[in-house]
Amino acid sequence: MLIARVAGVDAQSDITKLSVTYEVHYLNYAEDDSLSRDIAQLDIGTNTSRYYSKVSEWYNFNPVGKAPYPGTKIKNEEVYKNMPNKGLVTAMHWPYWITTQDSINHLFDWQLVEGNSIVCGYPCHKAQTTFRGRTWTAWYTLDLAYNDGPWKLCGLPGLILHAQDSTRQFIFDCTSIEKGDGHTFSFPASKRIRLVTPEKAEELLLFEAADNDAYVYAMSGGRITDRIDAKGRHYKWTPKTAIPYEIFPQNHKKKNKTNPRSRKKK
């Protein structure tokens, strides 16, 4: 298992041993009529793992050009397990390096339940857990003995190949599993990392969607003077309601009380 293999290791970089690709469907804003779609990859190394958007990664290396991922929308996140230190799950939200850290041990209280399926050609077993406001169902395979998975999900006796929350606002579906090509991945060395609690991270996510201009100014001191969409059209930000992975009731009480603009009128 992944955690067992890293018991004595602190790591800033690792070498990919296995690469798992997931098609990710997620509800970005409450006002959206349909789920957005991203393509994510979990790179599992000797000691650690990195989960990230393949679409975002492509643009990082190809700033000019059309990405080979039509119909996708980047979810601005990365998750590192056992990085930069053993026993940590480190999650980052872009572009302002909003970062949280959790202890990996017993992060999820999984219940193994009856159920079998085949995902990406692998026999899978079923498990469920409730974590920070969401109930998750996961399908994991004992044939790949890594207790890892997409996003923060981990802690089962095999690799998670499919997972979704009970509202189906987040769905991860494995589409391919490949032997790692040996490339190195590293933990970001940026001094701009802003380490906050998970509660604060959700509060900032809600703020970012509700009043993006104010959020950008609060985080960077800069002001957005113009917005242009993918078709070259100018537009103004419309207040939205973000849909977070983790739900903290106190943030939603605060939002409803102090930021009514974030609620779309029916």
Image (cartoon, rainbow, N blue to C red):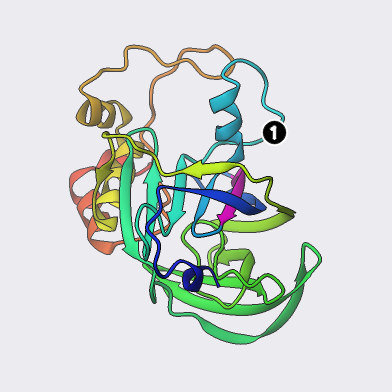
The quarter of the picture where residue 132 lies is: bottom left
The vertical placement of 237 against 47, above or below, is above
Q: Is residue 36 magenta?
A: yes
Give coordinates of residue 100: x percent, y percent.
31, 53
Q: Is residue 222 visible?
A: yes
Is 107 or 130 nearer to us in this picture?
107
Single out the residue that lies furthest toward the right. 121
Question: In this rendering, would 241 be left or right of 65?
Answer: left
The N terminus lies in which quarter of the figure?
Answer: bottom right
The vertical placement of 54 against 152, above or below, is above
Give coordinates of residue 46: x percent, y percent.
55, 59
The magenta region covers 34-45
Is 178 or 176 nearer to us in this picture?
178
Residue marked by disc 1: 69
The quarter of the picture where residue 87 lies is: bottom left
Q: Is residue 33 magenta?
A: no
Q: Is residue 29 visible?
A: no
Which three-letter amino acid code belongs to the residue tagged 1? Tyr
The quarter of the picture where residue 121 lies is: bottom right
Is 33 or 98 nearer to us in this picture?
98
